[in-house]
Image (cartoon, rainbow, N blue to C red):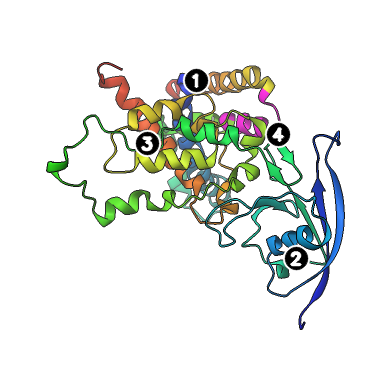
Amino acid sequence: MLKLEPIIWLLFGAGMMVGGLLLPAIVLVLGIAGPLGFAPAEALSYERIHGLATNPIGRLVCLGAIALPVWGGAHHLRHVWIDFGGLKTDGLVGPVLYAVALVTSVAGAVAVFQL
Amino acid sequence: MEGETKKTFVVTRFDPDQDEAPRTDTYEITVQPDWKVLDALNHIKDHVDPTLSHRWSCRMAVCGSCGMNVNGEPKLTCKDALSDYGDTVEVAPLANFPVIRDLVVEMEGFMEKFKAVKPWIMVAKERAIEEGTYRQSPEELDAFKQFSMCINCMLCYSACPVVSAEPDFLGPAAIALGHRYNQDSRDEGNAERNEVFRDDGGVFACSFANECSEVCPKNVDPSGAVQQAKLLNVIDWATGLVVSRGGK
């Protein structure tokens, strides 16, 4: 775990950034503006969004939006756990949380590249 | 005298020869309007109870000796106005340190953490006197000056949830000090210090609660130093993967 800290911290930093900035924007556009009709319907049409999500860069962005916040959340939860006195069990809890993030990332990658 | 008020001080006491656990003593004294918490403790020691032990020296927020928990928050008591408190003031030793007696805590472990970050200028080859002084621009000074203002009062260690959970954590002040030397244009010891920072209990143990910077009486912003140190450490680590440093 020790030597992986820098890379996990980078994923955490990126994940918190994506979770804080990109996800609210996606929710605003797809979850609120779209259904309420604030966004033009043709801009959010299936073909258009499908084209965006299957573009090579689009796939990477989708993967980042799925995987990075999970890494951010896993690392954050681990530190919350330690702050609340869970240091003794960190050797178990840390790897489990990161394993969840890894599995989610792989599943996300498979899903995104099968679109 | 005008403005005098009465305040009750609930002070944590502990005598290792007699007490199994810390207890409290209560003192009701008359305080002057311009008194700091330290003035009240000195008054208690001089006039009420000479057995009370507490550390202090300069009375002007420079020496860093008089840190204590006042109403549960780490404070430099010589800088902490009594007028900010109500009728009852609780004074306890700093948290996260072993107590030697009453309000006096053991600093040994703290000093060891300071040594661990190698807080001195390291150069591969000392410059000869004829070659002149090491010159530094105002910008180069600005890069670290703030982090050099620490007075080692240990308030940040008392406030830090990570220090509380992981006693081996280097802690805010030591990391800020190491970072201060890493940022110094005259220093060449980054690689060595970054290895200490990267180790167990190093910068990545910090959970960014930011409590250290909240309580710092000198506005050092140790939390900022730790976050900067994390980023520089990641860059250093990633560079190390591609570039061999030779000999290390």
Q: Give the structural element (helix, strand or loop) at label 2.
A: loop
The span from disc 1 to disc 2 (Cα, nearest Å) is 45 Å
How far apart marks 3 and 1 lie (CA) works out to 17 Å
Q: Amino acid at mark 3?
A: Leu
Tag 1 residue: A2
Q: Is residue A6 visible?
A: no
Instruction: Give A8 or A69, whichever is nearer the viewer.
Output: A8
* Residue wearing tag 4: A84
Badge 4 amino acid: Phe
Res. A16 in view: yes
Residue interval drawn in magenta: A74-87
The residue where tag 2 is placed is: B85
Q: For residue A28, which numbered disc appears in the image?
A: none
Whether pointer 4 and pointer 1 mark residues with C-beta atoms closer than 8 Å, the reply is no
User: Which residue is pictured at 50% across the width and 56% down the height?
Assistant: B219
According to the picture, the residue beneath numbered tag 3 turns out to be B232
Q: How crowded is the residue under tag 3: few (<14 C-alpha within 10 Å), some, or many (20+)?
A: some
Residue A48: which quarter of the image? top left
- Tell me whether marks 2 and 3 sit on the same chain: yes
Where residue A52 appears, as percent x and y from the top left, is 39, 36
Q: Secondary structure under badge 1?
A: helix
